[in-house]
Amino acid sequence: MDQFLQHLVNASVLGGTYALLGIGLTLIFGIMNVVNFTHGAIYTFGAYAMYLAAVALGLNFFVALPVALVAGLAMGALIEFALLRPLRRSDIDTTMLVMIGAGIILQSGTLWIFGGVAKAVPTPFPDAPLVIGPVSVSYVRLFVFCAALALIALTYFTINGTRLGRAMRATFQDHDTAALMGVNVSLIYTATFAIGSALAAAAGALLGPVYVVFPQMGDLAAVKAFAIVILGGLGSISGATIGGFILAFAEEIGAGYISSGYRDAMGFLIIIAVLLVKPTGLFARAERIG
Amino acid sequence: MTRLLAPTLLVVLAALPLVLKDPYLVNALIITGIFTICAMSLNLLLGFTGQLSLGHVAFFGIGAYVSALTALGFDVGLPFGLRVTYEGGSPLVGFGLAIVVTGLAGYLIGRLSFRVRGAYFVIVTISFAEVVRLVALNWVELTQGPLALTSIPNMTLPLPGLGEVALRTKIQNYYLVLAVATLSYLVIARLVGSRLGRAMRGLKENESLALSLGINATRTLTIAATVSAAMAGAAGSLYAHYIRIIDPDVFLFSYTVTMVIMVVAGGKGTLAGPLVGGLLFGLLPVALRPVMAPEAQWIVYGAILIAILFVMPKGIVPALEALTRRRVARAEPNPALEAGAQP
């Protein structure tokens, strides 16, 4: 039972950042109908931005984090503007392949500039973990969990409580009608991709200091994000949030009680199972098979 | 013009070892040939049926492992106390088994994956490939995991009077790959030209219309996936017996990306496209190797993929065809204009 409690705590900490990744991807997927293969590379980009800001520029940890987030925002806007805007009328396969190309460039560029050796990001938190009864958790993980929850709340508020969010939801429902009502759909697309990318970068910047930063860290993160989106249903923020925690929980239980080697297989198995059994996702409203 | 491309290419490639002696270049051509077979098989799905499968490397890898394990033998424990021990045997049997097993895997995965379309199909196929990679990495008793399968014997061929002869030299392997590639090309050309091939293209152009004409979508797509997978499995087997060492990295997503770039750049849905794309991207590393690091090469590949999708989204071969058609049209004046319409 104690062991189970510990797994539950670990899963919750991990689930927060997974949810961030998933929300970023589900926004882009749902609103723009773009399968974003740069998501993993942006996650890596965020982690390296954190590393650069905290180590090379010597910024305070709590200042470096927003810097990484803004870097992700800018990178997302750039990719949307340069690559997706000209391809708006292309089919989904073409944009998917272009995104794969962009992802390769980002990832290989990171490898080229920083080399393959993993980097560590120092944190201001004490090394000794916080121990409550049978459960122990390090302070940095606790902070990551709280920061992730804060960002999820912020995104939720942006989507549901602001003019921009209302325009995004309108575009998701019907972009032609939204355009007729005076919504600048092009701007909404750029904003969506930028916000989605910022969330991925934030996830990377938060998990980078917990583990280490290396160029291929985004590969698995991308697939996990896809798993979360498929689990939660297209374009659903609450679905992605719950999906993030379910995936983290499945991984933690799978690694703890089955085999740690298959930890990362959980995401893929969830994708396959959900798509084959209930292709609309567990919490979906929108139809998705086309 | 592109009709003659494949036979011309075959003659040139068959004659090439007579002048080309550099073992590094022959090696590059062998690897290029193996990946061109993969690209051709992927084109059957991506180009002719319009289904973007990004899990193609799974079949390449399964083919490599099945063939290598058939040649090397294994001793593996199964649940319920069962134990399978196999001594190892002929690589040629491995080649055949690789085709059968990957064909079967293609059939099963196709059966399951074709229940969804578009982006979901893409993600399911990636997931299958990654699950297979993780199994290869973790089932150490069978695959040796990251320690790799080593000392895989060379491919053998039964020759009249000589028994089974091992193909040890690069030139022998070169001709083996060329033969398998030619055979794959002929199979695809035959398939695409048949009634089934028309059904595939019908599904690509308009699935609802094709269904209304009585085309069985799942059956047609599954046949394409089976043939495609078996061919990639054959390529994997050739790879295993040529390189003679394989590890779970044969399942890496970057190999799938290489195949996709070959098909998209050459021209998906054309017979000559994967040949052109395969040769181009197979030999590009040879050209780029002296001037840049592998990471930088990948940046170039990514940029070329994007550039091709922007500039000629249909690929090189269709672009060339359009160009020659325009030139022919210019050379032969339009009779309607000559007949005296007023300027």
Image: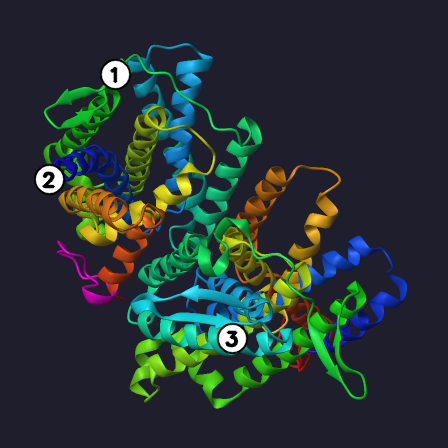
The answer to whether A284 is drawn above or below residue A166 in the figure is below
Residue wearing tag 2: A1
The answer to whether A73 is drawn above or below residue A121 in the figure is below
Decide if residue B243 is on the left or right side of residue B103: right
Q: Residues within 10 Å of mark 2 (few under 14, many from 20)?
A: few
Percent of width and height locating residue B132: 41, 60
Percent of width and height locating residue B255: 54, 55
Q: What residue type is labelled 2?
A: Met
Element assignment for label 1: loop
Of helix, strand and loop, which mostly describes the magenta segment? loop
Which one is nearer the viewer's eye here, A149 or B265? A149
Magenta segment boundaries in residue numbering: A276-288
Residue wearing tag 1: A128
**What residue do we see at 48% from left, 43% from top?**
A102
Label 1–label 2 contact, CB within 8 A: no
Residues marked 3 and 2, same chain: no
Percent of width and height locating residue B262: 59, 59
| Numbered tag placed on residue B230 in the rendering | 3
Tell me if residue A286 is in the magenta stretch: yes
| Badge nearest the viewer, 3 or 2 | 2
Element assignment for label 3: helix
Label 1–label 3 contact, CB within 8 A: no
